[in-house]
Image (spheres, rainbow, N blue to C red):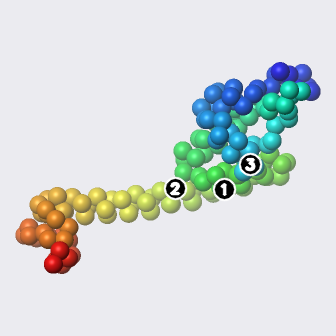
């Protein structure tokens, strides 16, 4: 299959396989506007330009960095439309702050769980261990 410019075009399955996503993800990204709706072959098949594979790998990489699909759409949408894209550096710095906050929360949870294990707690509602870090209550009665 080749396009108007003579370049090869890919079918949905080919794009999905090369990008490491499934076809449903490809179509979902289409509906969300992350990738443009492809042209159709004379037989009615979707005909994606090869750059779609690269765009999908960029989208997946951005998701692995913690960006939501909405954030990814903002980051790639303006840049593709000829307008300057939002400042990736500023967005990444904000994402780092979010990650740091989550790490702090998880560290606090880990510390509390470590105290529960160290104290020898045996029950959430009827713990009889000395120095129990859990709230003192007897919900079982």
Tag in front: 3 or 1? 3
Q: Earlier in the sequence, mark 1 or mark 2?
A: 1
Instruction: Looking at the picture, tell me which residue is in the foreground, 75 or 18.
Output: 18
Tag 1 residue: 70
Relative to 137, 33 lies left or right: right
Q: Give the CA distance from mark 1 to mark 2.
A: 17 Å
Tag 2 residue: 96
Circle 1 residues within 10 Å: few <14, some 14–19, many ≥20: few
Q: Is residue 6 above or below residue 90?
A: above
Residue visible at 13% across and 69% down? 127
Q: Is residue 39 above or below residue 82?
A: above
Residue visible at 21% across and 58% down? 114
Total numbered labels placed on residues in the image: 3
Dividing the picture into quadrants, the one containing residue 138 is bottom left
Instruction: Looking at the picture, tell me which residue is in the foreground, 61 or 39.
Output: 39
Quadrant of the drawing holding the N terminus: top right
Is residue 11 something that shows in the picture? yes
Is residue 136 something that shows in the picture? no
Q: Give the CA distance from mark 3 to mark 1.
A: 13 Å
**Are dots 3 and 2 in contact, CB under 8 Å?**
no
Q: Earlier in the sequence, mark 3 or mark 2?
A: 3
Relative to 135, 17 lies left or right: right
Q: Earlier in the sequence, mark 3 or mark 1?
A: 3
Quadrant of the drawing holding the C terminus: bottom left
Q: Regarding mark 2 in the picture, which secondary structure is present there?
A: helix
């Amino acid at each position: 299959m080749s396009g108007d410019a003579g370049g090869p075009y890919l079918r949905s399955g080919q794009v999905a396989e090369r990008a490491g996503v499934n076809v449903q993800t490809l179509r979902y990204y289409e509906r969300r506007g992350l990738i443009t709706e492809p042209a159709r072959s004379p037989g009615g098949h979707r005909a994606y330009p090869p750059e779609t594979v690269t765009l999908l790998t960029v989208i997946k990489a951005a998701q692995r960095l913690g960006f939501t699909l909405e954030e990814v759409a903002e980051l790639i949408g303006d840049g593709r439309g000829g307008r300057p894209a939002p400042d990736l550096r500023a967005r990444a710095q904000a994402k780092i702050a979010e990650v740091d906050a989550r790490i702090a929360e998880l560290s606090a949870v880990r510390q509390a769980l470590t105290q529960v294990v160290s104290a020898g707690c045996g029950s959430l509602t009827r713990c009889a261990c000395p120095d129990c870090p859990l709230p003192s209550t007897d919900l079982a009665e």
